[in-house]
Amino acid sequence: MDGCGLDSDGREFKNAEEMWREEVGDGDPLKKSQWYSQGVGYWQKGVEATVDGVLGGYGHVNKPDIEGSEAFLNSLLAERFPDAGRGRRLVALDCGSGIGRITKNLLIRYFNEVDLLEPVSHFLETARRNLAPENLMVTEEYKAVNFFCVPLQDFTPEAGRYDMIWVQWCIGHLSDDDFVSFFERAKDQKGLPEELFAVKMYALSTELPKKVNKSSRSKRHVNRPGIIK
């Protein structure tokens, strides 16, 4: 946030640093812990463990959300794991998994094992039920394995376990410093062979529309993957 800005309560801040000092304190672990506890408490006490609940009342976006995610995932799998399904087993971590919406509708169809990470206990228990073998339209070769009831900011991925770490609709709950710290812990797992190419992180970015004459037809925004440097 550059220049002045307002938070959801209408308070004005000169910049992002000033806002975070107010929200989580300046190096005060207790204040930051309380801030995270309040965030989890909102989901723990007031949100039903349903698709509509975890999507904030926008359950109808589940289908297009999954379709867009699947198109993005397929582009990554084709580039990074062309031998997937031909003897190579893949493992994914679903961060902020909620009730297992992304795992059940997407990841479990592509990854042999999926671990779920979610701090809201009743969401995770619902995910465990949703992902029981009898509720999945996949073979026994694809399954949810571990269910971690741990906040994203406190979790360190097991070195060498995951082929893909999936973070969707939840990274915005982290403070800026915890956001950076999590990506540092997740980006280059230790214990991998030195001859492998460096692992890069990808995200969707929006390309600004080109300027056109008023008489010309307007250009549509184009979304495509971009490298986070």
Image (cartoon, rainbow, N blue to C red):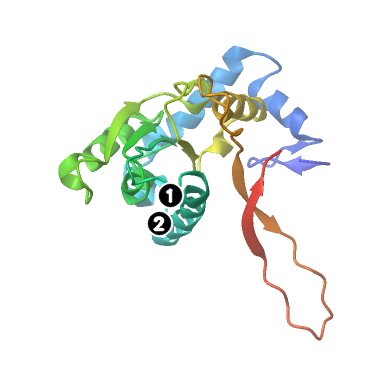
On the rendered image, what quadrant is the C terminus found in?
top right
Q: Nearer the viewer, mark 2 or mark 1?
A: 2
Task: Tell me whether circle 2 and circle 1 mark residues in contact (CB < 8 Å).
Answer: yes
Q: Is residue 130 left or right of residue 81?
A: left
Which residue does the numbered mark 1 point to in the structure image? 55
Q: Residue at x 76, y 29 (%)?
A: 17
Residue underneath mark 2 = 62
Secondary structure under tag 1 reads loop
**Which quadrant holds residue 7?**
top right
> To which quarter of the image does residue 219 belong?
bottom right
Inter-mark Cα distance, 2 to 1: 8 Å
Q: Is residue 211 left or right of residue 8?
A: right
The residue lying toward the viewer, choosing from 127 and 223, is 223
Q: Amino acid at mark 2?
A: Asn
What residue do we see at 55% from left, 35% from top?
173
Q: Position of residue 116 (x, y in %)?
A: 37, 33
Label 2 element class? helix
Quadrant containing the N terminus is top right
Residue at point 67%, 71% (across, down): 220
What's the mark number on residue 183?
none
- x, y percentage for residue 120? 38, 30
Q: Nearer the viewer, residue 168 or 195?
A: 195
Q: Amino acid at mark 1?
A: Leu
Of pointers 2 and 1, the one earlier in the residue sequence: 1
Location of residue 196 by image quarter: top right
What x and y, as percent, mark residue 161?
Answer: 42, 26
Along the line of sight, the residue nearer the viewer: 48 or 219 = 219
